[in-house]
Image (spheres, rainbow, N blue to C red):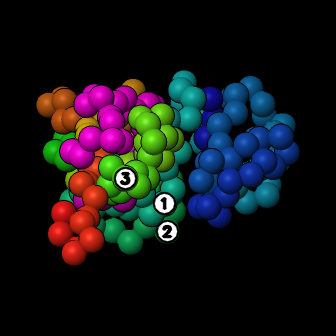
Amino acid sequence: MARIYSVNVNHNYKVGGVEFVNGVAVVEDTETEMLNYFENKGYEVITGDDSNLTELEKLNLEQLKEIAEELKIVKNYTSKKEALTDIKGQSNAFTIEITEFDVEDIDGGDTENPIFKDATEVIEALPQFVTANGAGTLIEVDSWADTDNYNASVAGTYTFTGTISELPEPYANTASTPLTIDVIVAEPESEDGEE
């Protein structure tokens, strides 16, 4: 496969039938006419990679800069290709282990006026993407599950657990750090302001 790098690192649309994701696209090495077209238009073309677009390559430049910073690479990147090259070189040696997911508790209202009537409504409101370790790299959540039998009529803290099937490079979760969000349902306040 050949990589085609756009000058515009935020390039997210099709050109000549080729779809770009945050400034990079892949086509077959055998598509020489197409590759020549892009080279003549000022795109950088690199051939000889056997893989399709990786999760790391799908990230935008700002996300790659954050990963580079975590890998202790101090550069002011303006090129996505340069950032990817450095990160891949470093991430072959080690990975960034996830120690925590950056999520906050969710207000579920109170038992008289719950914000979510059931677990299905909670799950629909939970994020599709989260971050980890205080960095801004987005991690896609495949699904959420009600692990505490959510009941809007009973005050308490209800935990929902997320499942992630694929982490962006170079992140790893070998310690199986859980992704959980707590939904808090309170007792209604009394008329004098006390619960």
What's drawn in magenta, residue-wise? Answer: 134-156
Res 3 → quadrant: top right
Task: Kindly identify the residue that appears in the image at 53 percent across and 45 percent down.
Answer: 58
Task: Kindly identify the residue that appears in the image at 80 percent across and 55 percent down.
Answer: 40
The residue under label 2 is 78
Q: How many marks?
A: 3
> Given the image, on which type of amino acid does mark 1 rest?
Leu
Q: Secondary structure at mark 1?
A: helix
The residue under label 3 is 112
Task: Kindly identify the residue that appears in the image at 44 percent across and 31 percent down.
Answer: 143
Seen in the picture, residue 122 relative to 149 is either above or below; the reply is: below
Q: Nearer the viewer, residue 71 or 168?
A: 168
Asked whether, in this view, residue 166 is left or right of residue 50, the answer is left
Q: Secondary structure at mark 2?
A: loop
x, y percentage for residue 70? 24, 57
How many C-alpha atoms fall within 10 Å of the one at disc 1: few (<14), some, or many (≥20)? many
